[in-house]
Amino acid sequence: MENMHTTIPEIISTPDGLEQLVRNYCNETLLAFDLEADSMHHYREKVCLIQVATSTEAVLIDPLVLPDISSLASLLVDPAIRKVFHGADYDVRSMRRDFSVQVNNLFDTMIACQFLGEKEVGLAAVLKKRYGVDLDKRYQKADWSKRPLEPAMIAYAAADTSLLVPLYRQLESELVAKGRLAWVEEESMLLSQAAAAERDNKPLFYRFKGADKMDPRTLAVLEELLQLRDEKARLSDRPPFKILSHETLSLLAEKKPRKNMDLFALSALSPNQTDRYGSEILKAVGRGVSLADDRLPSFPRPARLRRDRLKIERCKKLKLWRETRSAEMGLYAGVLANNNLLEALSDLVPRNMEELEKVPALRQWQRDEFGAELLAELGQTC
């Protein structure tokens, strides 16, 4: 096993330093990346630190100090360099949002662990199991926008990437032995195309967990409360959840307090929250309660294809096939084939490989590896 880097990592904070790093790494075939952000501390999160590692060193890039990091993009987009991330979804979206960069030739070691049947796929658990390394979790929720960075935070950031290269090589070898490397490469490629999450003009309750179960009047109240929270968060440069929690908003929307005594009775707010936001909360609830019936919002629901008895039977049969095959392969069922795919197959009922390829939720690796089996299962219930 390659040792975790023990030297204090260099922090790149000048354009010349970044240019030199790019020149040094442009001929590498394998680089590990991670990033730190400040989503726990600010209204609009941003990338605050980028970690890069080879098999011999880890380097930190400070995008808050550098006027421009566009030269780094040449490494990230280069298809000849494999970029290793662990749990890359957030990182990929953040890089695209802040720097308009897409990561090419991505390899996600968390996805690799899933396709090897690992029970725990978080980086700390994986490194503990495979290398006996304990990652210090104290700084996972730190404010990475503060400068200067503490020495312990610098060490933490470097440790996050220092073992990703040897981990990749170990996982790659195991995936090759099981014939699953192409599966992970395809999933990683699709992940690399993830778009940055952008704010839009849709109601805020669209992204509120549990809103799909609320009645229109409650949704109207919830939207008013969400708009109030968002305004307060923006003005104070704090994450919205630090203004009012998800649970508090749910309770306020459901109970719809109209007076101060109603707020006190709910015990939903701290004394400080009551003093700061109590009157505005009551006004927001009042606006939602008084909204005209013909203007009440509704939660968007996707059109559902009509499912007859045969479709239901096909889906049941596919789920039974998935349960059996995933157990044989030592995988979680959802990794082998998620419910959306099984629903699509049972609705569309492809009759041959050509039609199977047109099923939108189907991956190429699933078609190549299990296409004949899927067609056989569908053919038995057609």
Image (cartoon, grey):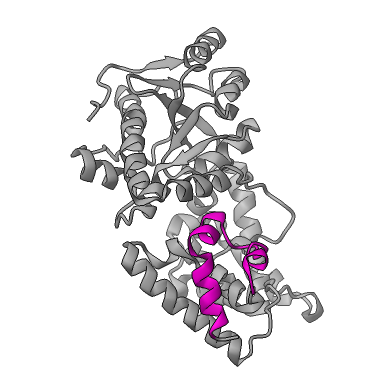
Q: Residue furthest right?
A: 294
Query: Who is closer to the viewer here, 105 or 377?
Result: 377
Question: Relative to residue 381, is residue 71 depicted above or below?
Answer: above
Percent position (x, y) of residue 79? 57, 30
Identify the residue shown where x is 25% and y is 27%: 2
Q: Is residue 257 visible?
A: no
The x and y percentages for residue 132 are 18, 39
Place of residue 373 in the rendered image (x, y in percent of width and height, measured from the top left): 49, 71
Q: Nearer the viewer, residue 56 or 144?
A: 56
Instruction: Count the numbered circles shown.
Output: 0
Q: In the image, 135: left or right of 214?
A: left
Q: Residue 120 falls in which quadrant of the image?
A: bottom left
Residues in magenta, as a range? 351-380
Q: Is residue 376 visible?
A: yes
Q: Residue at x 60, y 46 (%)?
A: 194
Quarter of the C terminus within the rendering:
bottom right
* Percent of width and height locating residue 4: 25, 27
Q: Residue at x 33, y 47 (%)?
A: 177
- Quarter of the image holding residue 58? top left
Residue occupying the point 68% across, 63% down: 358
In the rendered view, would you say 30 is above or below 95?
above
- Left or right position of 307 against 191: right
Question: In the depicted view, which residue is nearer to us: 351 or 96?
Answer: 351
Q: Is residue 360 magenta?
A: yes
